[in-house]
Image: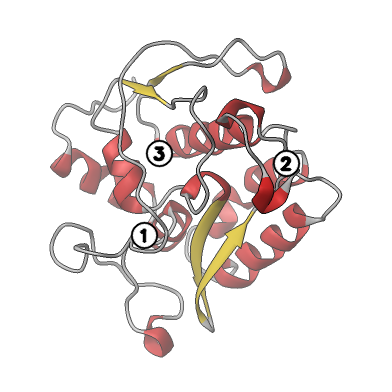
């Protein structure tokens, strides 16, 4: 579930190249997302087979299902956003996504993106570099690219008007935290507010008919 700045960058293009044949980079948003709970920012990381010593292309990364990461992530998301205004509208579908994840990290990323684009009711970009997958009926084609920010500095330069301000669940305790996972924006502000921001920043976006 990408951060706001990354998702907005994706929405600039009708086609995205995920560069799956390139070496898998450590410390990226490919296997993590950042949410906010009562303790502040929390990073949810997906374990992969081979761990830190893994060497190989992005499309060969296998999620380590020997660890109940999906259960831990779901509980963390529920704890952080269970009381948010929009959580109940999407909780069942999101829970199903977490409890039936695919084996490959790339497929998980694609499913998360599809979920976001679907609930926001905006056109889903074509994705380049992925073969047809029977599982979950994931389809990908096209060509373009986007920048993948590093979680170490993902908030750099994003404290001004570049990103939206909205009421977060634990804002009174933590203060406003910018550029979290899109889960935070969707659950706290709702799809209409997200679309309004995206339309304002990306004029070419048209809502699905």
Foreground pick, 94 / 6: 6
Q: What element carries label 2?
A: loop
From the viewer's perspective, tell me whether residue 29 is left or right of residue 88: left
Q: What element carries label 1?
A: helix
Q: Which mark is residue 120?
A: 3
Precedes in sequence: disc 1 or disc 2? 2
Q: In this view, does 111 lie above or below 134?
A: below
In the rendered image, which residue does mark 1 sit on? 189
Q: Which residue is drawn at 45% across and 11% down?
A: 141
Q: Is residue 145 above or below residue 153?
A: above
Precedes in sequence: disc 3 or disc 1? 3
Separation (CA) of disc 2 from disc 3: 27 Å
Tell which tag, 1 or 2, sits nearer the viewer: 2
Precedes in sequence: disc 2 or disc 3? 2
Q: Residue at x 35, y 43 (%)?
A: 7
Q: Is residue 21 above or below residue 142?
A: below
Determine crowd level at label 2: few under 14, some 14-19, many 20+ residues with C-alpha closer than 10 A: many
Q: Is mark 3 on a helix, strand or loop?
A: helix
Q: Position of residue 194 (x, y in %)?
A: 31, 49
Q: Are marks 3 and 1 in contact (CB under 8 Å)?
A: no
Q: Where is residue 169 in the image (x, y as percent from the top left)?
A: 45, 75
Q: Which residue is drawn at 75% across and 33% down?
A: 103
Determine crowd level at label 3: few under 14, some 14-19, many 20+ residues with C-alpha closer than 10 A: some
Q: Is residue 47 among the parts visible in the rendering?
A: no
Q: Is residue 134 above or below residue 156?
A: above
Q: Position of residue 177 (x, y in %)?
A: 34, 73
Tell which tag, 2 or 3, sits nearer the viewer: 2
Determine crowd level at label 1: few under 14, some 14-19, many 20+ residues with C-alpha closer than 10 A: some
In the rendered view of the protein, which quadrant contains the C terminus? top left
Separation (CA) of disc 3 from disc 1: 12 Å
Q: Which quarter of the figure has residue 137?
A: top right
In the rendered image, which residue does mark 2 sit on? 63
């Amino acid at each position: 579930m990408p951060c706001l700045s990354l998702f907005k960058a994706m929405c600039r293009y009708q086609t995205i190249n995920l560069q799956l044949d390139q070496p898998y980079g450590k410390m990226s948003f490919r296997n993590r997302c950042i949410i906010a709970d009562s303790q502040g920012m929390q990073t949810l990381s997906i374990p992969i087979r081979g761990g830190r010593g893994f060497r190989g292309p992005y499309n060969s990364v296998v999620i380590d299902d020997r660890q109940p990461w999906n259960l831990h992530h779901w509980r963390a998301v529920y704890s952080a956003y269970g009381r948010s205004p929009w959580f109940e509208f999407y909780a069942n579908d999101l829970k199903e996504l977490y409890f039936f994840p695919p084996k490959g990290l790339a497929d998980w990323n694609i499913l998360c993106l599809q979920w976001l684009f679907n609930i926001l009711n905006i056109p889903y970009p074509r994705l380049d570099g992925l073969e047809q997958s029977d599982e979950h009926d994931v389809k990908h084609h096209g060509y373009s690219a986007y920048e993948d920010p590093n979680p170490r500095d993902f908030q750099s330069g994003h404290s001004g008007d570049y990103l939206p301000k909205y009421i977060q669940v634990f804002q009174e305790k933590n203060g406003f935290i910018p550029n979290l996972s899109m889960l935070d924006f969707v659950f706290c502000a709702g799809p209409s507010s997200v679309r309004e921001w995206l339309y304002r920043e990306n004029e070419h976006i048209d809502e699905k008919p």
